[in-house]
Amino acid sequence: MSIEFSADAQAKIDALVTRYPTKQAVVLAALHLAQKEFGHLSDEAMKLVARTLDVPYAHVFGVVTFYTMFRREPAGKNVLRVCTNVSCMLRGAYDVLAAFEQKLGIKVGESAGDFTLVEEECIAACANAPAVICGTKYFLDVTPAQIDDIVAYLKDRPHPESEVV
Amino acid sequence: MAADRDTKVVTHRFGDESAKEIATYEAQGGYQAVRKALAMTPADIIAEVKVSNLRGRGGAGFPTGIKWGFLPKDADRVYLVCNADESEPGTCKDRELIYWDPHQLIEGMVIAAHALGATDNYIYIRGEMMREYAVLERAVAEAYERGYLGDGVFGTGTRCHITIHRGAGAYICGEETSLINSLEGKRGWPRLKPPFPAVEGAFAKPTIVNNVETLANLPYIIANGGQWFADLGVGRSGGTRIVCVSGHVERPGIYELPMTITFNELINEVCGGVWKGRKVKGVIPGGSSMPPLSADELDVPVEFDALMSDERIRPVEVLPGVLFDMGGGRQLRSMAGSGGIVVMDEATDMAEVTARIIAFYRHESCGQCTPCREGTGWLAKIATRVARGQGRPGDIDLMATIADSIAGNTICALGEAAAWPTLGFITKFRADFEAKIAAAGKAA
Ligand SMILES: Cc1cc2nc3c(=O)[nH]c(=O)nc-3n(C[C@H](O)[C@H](O)[C@H](O)COP(=O)(O)O)c2cc1C
Ligand code: SF4
Ligand code: FES
């Protein structure tokens, strides 16, 4: 059974196609939309994007595997991206990451319940290190002592990345 | 008049949540400069930008007016792309510029597009910047509603469209040819240059890629004149500079400051000094790809040319006494890069910092070139073992030799971005590496 985009997503894709000289240019946007609609990028979802934009499936597959935000497996509602790059490391980011691992009972890269934990590179919030991002929400100047509150907050108010697509 | 510490050209609306609304922006005089620009000829705008000494704020510090001049005169179609992929570690200004003042960027883009004859333009925004994407999307929609973007902007016959293009997680897409491939819906693999994007870029057409901060300065250059902007700065560097100060200072932050401020003044007078009453050990002056400065090199200003040529900065070496050659015998001191300044206190383990920086570039290498792909892999392995106290005699020179063989031998500058800090940290903080290796020898 093949899957289809919702009318809303299809309309967005149709509008975007008029903005570029090629349909291929819309591949990233269509993949963001597919990930929102289907949760992750299954073979079926990648085929749908290929079909919609008249590009080879192999091209879409190559794009999906290049970019870290595209997922071929389901993830938690909240994707917690904890920066451990140099500015954050200098102010205790690895302690923050360890505290998340302990609190959620998972290792980096794993999911449990509503959460997926990712060790992220610099998220352009270095002046407020250590920094954590979850969808449209930034947690800044984070200390291990704040981890309980952050997790409780996101359980109440999930911030899925697909919110802004 | 030279800028002083209170001069705020592009950050004066920071902190005002209402400034992202078009009504507030206009009430404060926004979208006036673009009206003036639309009445000017493209050649006059380019001349004004040349006089201004505006230099690219994305990393290379290349003069904007000169770069614009590389476009072929007879091009049937030209693209302007704003680089909002900000991901060089230590850099956090473009994200704030978008969040607090999206219309300032849009106005700058309409001015640039008119100067370049570009009708269909793109903002390439980093995929992880979801909050900023939402702000920008709203601002672009507001500008369309008022007729400031569209087929005939501000009641003129000039067509100017802006489409926001989201990335999806890949540092390398900040490199302009990688960004162009990503804009075309492909893997973000950098392209061989030449051809340079100004000749053949997006969709095989001449393309200008400019950083967010670069474009955000344009309304003020048009409003006040290129000479005014040149006078704010010093020498060949016009305007102010946004620096992002992170690491071990009391008050990290994003500060717009005169080009002439020194690192010592910045740390002690603006950022409240080094934290915990400690002393400074070293500073990364322009994002993690730039060679660090040691504590006795901090009386140098943050300005582009000073960091490249001030003789108070010791040049980077490959081996003790053997200078690194950037090509043609040119020495490497450091560079102002993206404005990301990372301060490290006396307790910092520089071997650990080096290993973390290398791990980043290894992770982000796109893998197209063997020296970068293999070289960053080896560097990461050796730097990690040194940092963990398992280094072997000879590891320092091995790292330096590998780094030296990456630099200059790759398609894009990510190779240098890994090699330069490796060589720079070893040159300036060799004792840290030696001590760790000596301790490892004793433990074994
Ligand atoms: C590996 C690498 C990463 C880069 N990342 C960025 C970036 O995130 N943002 C940016 O504006 N420029 C980045 N650049 C520089 C761009 O290639 C390009 O020079 C710049 O966007 C030009 O704009 P400007 O002249 O206004 O500075 C990067 C360069 C390299 C080699
Ligand atoms: S230098 Fe590295 S990142 Fe740049 S093209 Fe080559 S492999 Fe890719
Ligand atoms: S290093 Fe963590 S946000 Fe930049």
Image (spheres, coloured by chain):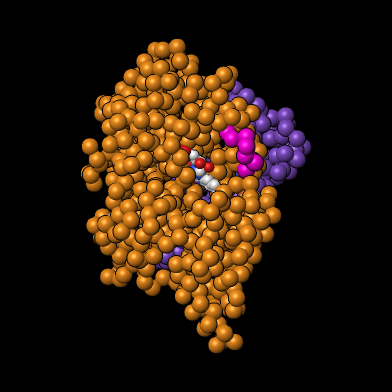
Chain colours: A purple, B orange
Which quadrant, please, contains the N terminus of chain A? top right
Residue B18 spot, x, y in % from top left? 30, 35
The answer to whether residue A149 is left or right of residue B277 is: right
Could you say which is closer to the camera, residue B189 or residue B64?
B64
Residue found at x 37% / y 68%: B281
- Whether residue B364 appears in this view of the structure is no
Could you say which is closer to the camera, residue B386 or residue B402?
B402
- Which residue range is magenta in the image? B190-197
Residue B123 spot, x, y in % from top left? 50, 33
Could you say which is closer to the camera, residue B235 or residue B271?
B235
Residue found at x 68% / y 51%: B369
Magenta stretch: helix, strand or loop mostly: loop
Residue found at x 62% / y 37%: B194
Residue B401 vertical placement versus B301 (above, below): below
Residue A121 spot, x, y in % from top left? 52, 55
- Whether residue B265 appears in this view of the structure is yes
Residue B86 vertical placement versus B21 (above, below): below
Residue found at x 46% / y 46%: B59
